[in-house]
Image: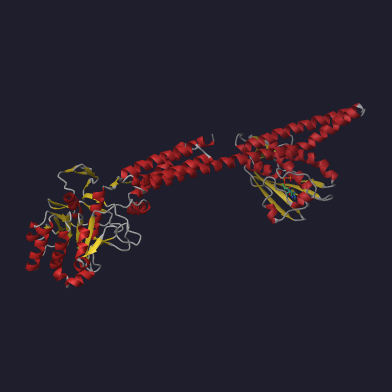
Amino acid sequence: MATTRIPATTYSAALIAVVTVALAVSYSPLASRIDNYATDWMFFMHKPAPWQPESLILGIDDESYVQMGGVGHLREALAQGLNLIAQAKPKVVAIDVILADKGDEAQNALLAAALRNIGTVILPCEMGANKWEDPIALFQKASKAIGHVHATADDDDGVTRHIPLERAVGRDRRWALGFEAYLKAHNVKQLEESPDDLDADGVRIPVARDPGGRSLRIRFLPPTEDGNSQIPQLTLKQLLDDPSKAAMAKDKVVFVGATSQSTARDRYMTPYTMRRPMPGVEIHAQLYETLASKRFLADYRMHNGILLGLFLAIAAGTTFYLLSGWPAYLCGLAIITIAHLVPHTFFLNGIVFPYFAPVIISWLSVSTAATFAHFLTRSQLQTSESEKTRYQEAIHFVAHEMRSPLTAIQGSSELMTRYNMNDDKRKQMAQMINSESKRLGKMIQTFLDVERLSDGQMQLKKEPFDMRAILESCLARVAPLAERKQIEVTSQPAPAVKLLGDHELMEYAVYNLLNNAIKYSPGETHVTVGASLDGSVLRLSVKDEGIGMDEKELKQIFTKFYRTKKAQASGEAGTGIGLSIVQQIVTHHGGKMEVTSRPGLGSCFTMILPCEEIETCNASS
Ligand code: ADP
């Protein structure tokens, strides 16, 4: 199978590297921000079915302040309102109005009486520098419990998603106002604490003990379609104007606090109210609703997300190692989809699962594995394409080069069978068949050698040879062709040097240059062979007065299968392979080719070859 050739070590190293990067990013502030946004989005996507709120908000808004005659009259007005509410017999009244300052005695007395009138009242406290700022003793006496009124916003984006259930100043710990309201309204007798949760008379509240205390995610009631809170609201002014409205508080847990835009300093953004922050009193009512409806959202810690991510990364790695093509890509897509869906599924089951870590790990590992597989397939494809091309080239070459000796053998053997010939003629024909078949054999050997050389399978033969012998043999071989076109071939005697390499391959190269010079020249022209020594370098040139080439064509003539338009129009047979092989042979001999040419005026091909020995050697050696 193609994919089993993925280099396992590099592949796993690449996957481990991207997973490490993903892990590092998963612990960044960006990741926690994205986790928060993802959770907020799920809040919108999977809104809980509406439920009947158990709470009521008695808000002190701007108009209420105007009616009571300013903040200075708050306690008096509050007392009036609470007295009305008391008649409706609410379950609990939780007050989020700070009552720690001394205030006016007469007003305090009125308010204390109203608080006693209510029955179950929970009063607020705020954290001071080193102690709790509790309501004055008069009010405390009238209350059943005191709860803190702190809500915390997320450090990254300022949105309130959690509320600290407990807060401590030194060793003095207070529960949150909304939680105290729940404990009293539901008459909780026993509250058990464990590191992972709280147990309130059998109701498990998923708040693990963290260094910062226990924090509960609020399952905010989604706002109504016109953007209002689902928790019923009544303002103090409305209540005082129309006392019958107090009936709304019957059997309810009433949260009393400032809702005024100008005085409520504690307003918080929530996942549902980014533009219209929610007053602190409503945040506590929402906390109460989360507890009362038991719609808890537990937080799964980061390591769960990372474990899922690692599992998906291993799945991605294995998939692309074992599969290829569409099945692999489909599995990759499935892995990424799982990473996105798991947090949703958990959310539907009341668990906030880390989102960013599994998603980034799965995306990075799938894309790395897929990229690996893609480039591997591409390089395999390229290899097989180039193998195919090489094979075709070889076939062309064989067909082209072997045609002429075969034609000679075929013609001679036909003549011998068809006609009666005298012994001399028959002998001549037989010799011709013999020499041509030897040439064919040599050619096949040369071809195979060139193939093996370029494949790197064969070392170049390293034997000393004499260039003069090669030149003589090649000149003799092209003589009949030159004669037919009445081309005069003149040659300088080659210097007496020895070259090191493969005699047969070099003969092939020289013959090719001479053959081309005659092939691509009109009749009655000259071909000149020059040979000269330049230090220890032999320059062997073949110059013709033929069709020539322009600059652009010159750049391509060593490319396999390239033929100039003029060469094709000349009617001479050719494959465009010969020169590419010549260049390979010359390169293998440590030399290089130089070509000069002008269209219509002729070309000069020069082989520049290093010599092994410069000495007098005889042509026959
Ligand atoms: P072939 O001659 O079989 O086409 P070669 O590889 O030997 O293949 O040559 C490649 C091309 O280079 C030729 O087709 C021709 O266009 C050009 N060429 C080679 N030698 C000459 C020459 N002496 N004069 C002009 N063009 C040449």
| Position in image of residue 478 (x %, y %) | 79, 41
Q: Nearer the viewer, residue 98 or 546?
A: 98
Q: Nearer the viewer, residue 213 or 314?
A: 213
Please give the name of the residue rendered at 70% of the width and 33% of the height, measured from the top-left corner. 445
Please give the name of the residue rendered at 41% of the width and 44% of the height, measured from the top-left corner. 362
Q: How is the image coloured?
A: secondary structure
Q: Is residue 104 above or below residue 39?
A: below
Q: For residue 233, which quarter of the picture?
A: bottom left
Q: Nearer the viewer, residue 332 or 456?
A: 332
Q: Nearer the viewer, residue 330 or 110?
A: 110
| Position in image of residue 441 (x %, y %) | 74, 31
Quadrant assignment for the C terminus: top right
Q: Is residue 361 visible to us here?
A: no
| Position in image of residue 72 (x %, y %) | 14, 70
| Position in image of residue 508 (x %, y %) | 72, 39
Query: Could you tell whether 167 is left or right of 495 in the image?
Result: left
Please give the name of the residue rendered at 70% of the width and 37% of the height, measured from the top-left corner. 395
The mark total stands at: 0
Query: Could you tell whether 621 is left or right of 89 in the image?
Result: right
Q: Is residue 489 above or below residue 428?
A: below
Q: Is residue 201 visible to us here?
A: yes
Q: For residue 95, which quarter of the picture?
A: bottom left
Among all residues in the image, which is located at the extreme front? 244
